[in-house]
Image (cartoon, rainbow, N blue to C red):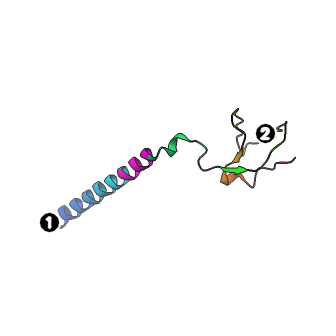
Amino acid sequence: MKTSTVLLLTAFLILLGSLAAYNMALKNEYNKGTYKDPYHNYITLNYRDFDQVEINPATEMNVKIKAGPFSVQVHPHATDLVKIKK
């Protein structure tokens, strides 16, 4: 076999192997079901007993307020941007 044929075959096999590995990892994550919880990587802060939320608009972050079980959650990358006062 020519060297170019061997190189192309090797590249194709590496591509095929990496796609198979990625698909298996993706299937494992799907089977766990963590994709259903949009806040699975958020940090829960211990704040209670407040009745107002003041939001100063900024271009740096988005704020989402949802009704549901009480918790204050912040994305790990936004902890230095969020200031919460009582």
> In this picture, is 55 found above or below 8?
above
Q: CA distance from mark 2 to mark 1?
A: 64 Å
Q: Amino acid at mark 1?
A: Lys
Picture coordinates of residue 45 (x, y %)? 74, 50
Which region of the structure is painted magenta?
24-31
The image quarter in which residue 62 lies: top right
Tell me if mark 2 has few (under 14), some (14-19) or many (20+) residues whose alpha carbon lies within 10 angstroms of its own: few
Q: Is residue 6 above or below residue 85?
A: below
Q: Amino acid at mark 2?
A: Pro
The image shows residue 71 at horizontal and vertical percentages of: 72, 43
Residue assigned mark 2: 57
Find numbered disc 2 in the image and state the secondary structure of the residue it sits on: loop
Q: Secondary structure at mark 1?
A: loop
Residue 67: mark: none
Q: At 75% from the left edge and 55% from the top edge, which residue is drawn?
A: 80
* Residue name at image x 19 percent, y 64 percent: 6
Write down the residue under mark 1.
2
